[in-house]
Amino acid sequence: MSKILRISLIVLLAISAFICVLFYVGGENMIGQPRFTNLYILWAYALTGLAVGFTIIFPVIQMISNPKNAKKSLLGVLALAAVVVVSYALASGELLGIIDPELIHYDVPSTLKYAGMMLNSIYVLAALAIITMVYSEVSKIFK
């Protein structure tokens, strides 16, 4: 299994490197943009899809094979859901009053509420990460 995974990762890295070289060296089209921009973006979508798929599939397999640890995983998911719900409740949908006609479609309460929720959740999760790192290092000092 380890050998198959290593070979798969090397193949993905080689394809990524090749597409990156094409993007930077492949020249430009008629309007001055790199020729292989669409290929680059599609490859990024494919890698993102793989990452999301494996992120969802492997924990489910782990929960099925080891149900005792499933409780801990579900508590983590519930905590994340609680952060998102609280962030949504704290977000404001107040209109910005954008006058520019090209940007007016962003001045919608639901879009603003969603953006506020994302920002609030990022702030909370970043603060939790920093607190966890500091706690981890400080607790090592006292052990």
Image (cartoon, rainbow, N blue to C red):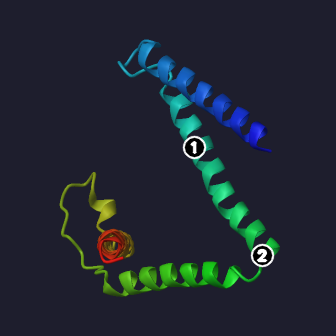
Vertical position of residue 106 compared to residue 113: above or below: above
In front: 123, or 143?
Answer: 143
Q: Which residue is mark 1?
A: 45
- Figure quadrant of the C terminus: bottom left
Q: Residue at x 25, y 79 (%)?
A: 94
**Residue 18: quarter of image:** top right
Amino acid of disc 2:
Asn
Q: In front of the other: label 1 or label 2?
A: 2
Write down the residue under mark 2: 66
Q: Nearer the viewer, residue 50 or 5?
A: 5
Residue 68 location (% of width, % of height): 73, 83
User: Disc 2 on helix, strand or loop?
Assistant: loop
Above-or-below relation of 129 to 72: above
Amino acid type shown at disc 1: Tyr
Pointer 1 or 2: first along the chain: 1
- Image coordinates for residue 69, horizontal then vertical, percent: 69, 79
Res 101 seen here:
yes
Nearest the viewer among 24 and 123 is 123
